[in-house]
Amino acid sequence: MRTFEGRPAAASMLLLIGGLVAGGGGPGPSPTPTKVAFTAEPINTAVGAAITPAVKVTVQDASGNPVTSSTAPITIAIGNNPGGATLGGTTTQNSATGVATFSDLTLDNSGAAYTLSASSSGLTSATSGAFNVFGAAALIAKNAGDNQTAEVGTAVPIDPQVLVTDANGVPVPQAPVTFQVTAGGGTVIPVTPVSTSSLGLASGHWTLGSQAGTNNNTLQASAGGVVAPVTFTASATPAPSGVTVQVGNGPGALVFVPQSVTIPVGGTVTWVWNSGSTSHTVSTSQGSPTIPGTPSGVHSTPFTFGPVQFNAAGTYTFYCSIHATATDPVSPGFMTGQITVQ
């Protein structure tokens, strides 16, 4: 038999194991459970629907570490109960590796700022964060963007916004809202229904029509399932009769500023070269009505063309023949421009 320092091998091994145990080399004691905590909070949910994702409660020690050895039963109850609801589903679950999962909890009445409580015998209980329970959409109200003023043919400064709630005033998410221009001849984007956010809000981007007037533009917003729509009103101010377009905006810049302008019939446009030594032209784009008296030739600073009067309504497009083509669109990245006469 082999020996270790004169001892039989088996005896030596027992001495070695004993030394490890005595020296603390073995596993330490399990953490002591002292409390429970929500580790997957309840979120806004519809009346009668299971709260999804599932609510989870974890057994923890005093430092907030999970106690994975715990199989303690945990019970869920309603804490704050603004709607007088009853909690449905399996409200007591045994922990598995320290975590109890509640996958079928429901509440049967709408309300704002519900909370849940979690408890287990001998442990400090916990309260969840607040959440809403919402019913079917019943009310729509203007939230922002009413009674605005903007220049004809331009968007109002604040996108009209509505709030959709249920009969108890709780915001309803994912409710379809349709915006529709009902007077003034403007446009709204998108033309398809907009789904409300988690806060019950939806907005549309509203551009006014071409005629100036007081409260002469209206926009209607309606929500699916809600009987009465709401109407936004806006006033359109006249477009300036005379505008200036910079040809280049600083040395070497290849832009018209502004790129698009709107003027009334009889209004004027003046082009002022502001490009340093960089040369540009102003030429009528292909397919556009001819800009009256468009200058020929190449020019650089200082040079001014205009004022040019536009006596016929229409859309006039122009470009720099050095830095764009006659068919380029009027959009960023192209040295192109547009005049709307209305």
Image: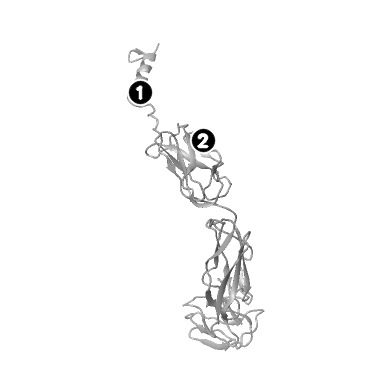
Asked if residue 37 lies left or right of residue 194, the reply is: left
Residue 93: mark in rendering = 2
Q: Residues within 10 Å of mark 1 (few under 14, many from 20)?
A: few
> Which quadrant would residue 162 be assigned to in this image?
bottom right
x%, y% of residue 216? Answer: 59, 78
Residue at (37% x, 14% y) in the render: 11
x%, y% of residue 281? Answer: 56, 82
Residue placed most toward the observer, 166 or 147: 166
Residue 21: mark in rendering = 1
At mark 1, the secondary structure is: helix
x%, y% of residue 114? Answer: 49, 49
x%, y% of residue 40? Answer: 49, 44
Q: Nearer the viewer, mark 2 or mark 1?
A: 2
Q: Quadrant of the C terminus?
A: bottom right
Residue placed most toward the observer, 164 or 4: 164
> Which residue type does callout 1 highlight?
Val
Would you place residue 111 above or below residue 178 in this image?
above
The alpha-carbon separation of the residues under discs 2 and 1 comes to 38 Å
Query: Does the image show residue 270?
Result: no
Lower position in the chain sequence, tag 2 or tag 1: 1
Residue placed most toward the observer, 156 or 323: 156
How many badges with numbers are in the image?
2
At mark 2, the secondary structure is: strand
